[in-house]
Image (cartoon, coloured by chain):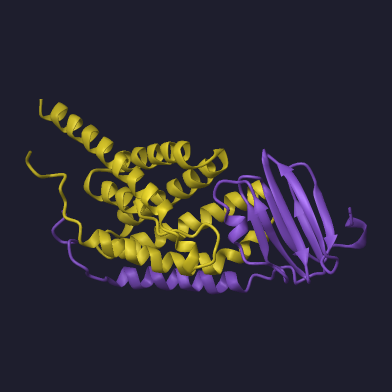
Amino acid sequence: MQLLDKKIRSLAFCGVFTALALACNLLEALIPLQVFIPLPGIKLGLANVVSVYVLYYIGEKEAFSVTVCRCIIASLILGSVTSFAFSLCGGVLSLTSSVLLKKIAKSRVSFIGVCVIGASCHNLGQIAVCCAMFGTLAVVRYLPLLLLSSVICGGIIGGILCFLPDITKRKV
Amino acid sequence: MGEDIVALKIKKGDVFAIFIVLVLAAAAFFIPMEKSGDKVNIKTDKASYVYFLNEDRRITLEENGISLTVVIENGEVYVENSTCRDGVCKKSSPISDGGCIVCLPAHVVIQISSGGADAIAG
């Protein structure tokens, strides 16, 4: 009974967090960050707050399913098949790096480090997809600026995560 | 589990992580890229076109259901108009030396190159 209860709880949380991640994605699409930083494809990565939150407070499997579901639904709403490949590759790579960091150095790295590395992996993944898809290395030129932006954006996202309380263990 | 991290505490590992990313960024900055050239290379799904940078012209492309207008003017290239949804290509600043403009939905990459004369298409 206890196990079933836990399963139902985790399923419900996955649904709620997927919806929240989607909301973050849509909210982000409204913020014209490119007006301030003229770099294509730059964004804050608010949805990563949800991914890392689920990873730390619920579990790895749940974090992956939330991220993949978010990518699929967000592409259906916002983008195209191409943007789906980009967002899925970036999201999964970023989450994989976070999982590894959590496993290897949980006590030594806080959310800020996890998010900075996650954001860089996201950008590296997208550049890699872009290179593969277009067969050109020209986009690598964006890499320094994208990595620099991932330090700033990842830092902000990690900072937000530090202040979020763990609601998943609360009694209903 | 949560209580020990609900506070803005920067740990050693964070500094290390940021340092690594910054070093990577610096390293990527020095990746030898093709130097600026005098030709404009437009790559699409179907073909690759090369134009002279110093010849003003207006190119209209129909790619993946998206209509793109690329303008070469005064040694600069920019996307004047595009029917794609996000319009990142329109917002990209004009390129003149080695940069590139990418339109993802249309699968079009515009870059400056110094490709040989045999590559000239139109």
Task: Report which quarter residue A31 is drawn in.
Answer: bottom left
In-front residue for pair A59/B87: B87
Can you say whether A7 is above or below B58 in the image?
A: above
Q: Colour of chain A?
A: yellow
Look at the image and tell me whether residue A130 can be seen: yes
Residue name at image x 20 percent, y 57 percent: A164
B38 vs A14, left or right, is right
A154 vs B93, left or right, is left
Task: Report which quarter residue B7 is drawn in.
Answer: bottom left
What percent of the width, then of the height, locates residue B33? 70, 68
Q: Chain B is drawn in which colour?
A: purple
Task: Report which quarter residue B70 is drawn in.
Answer: bottom right
What percent of the width, then of the height, locates residue B8? 22, 68
In-front residue for pair A18/A96: A18
Residue name at image x 9 percent, y 44 percent: A170
**What is the quadrant of the N terminus of chain A in the image?**
top left
What percent of the width, then of the height, locates residue A112? 31, 64
A153 vs B94, left or right, is left
Residue name at image x 47 percent, y 72 percent: B22
Q: Which residue lies furthest to the right in this view?
A: B118
What percent of the width, then of the height, locates residue B94? 67, 67
In-front residue for pair A78/B14: A78
Label count reads: 0
Look at the image and tell me whether residue A135 can be seen: no
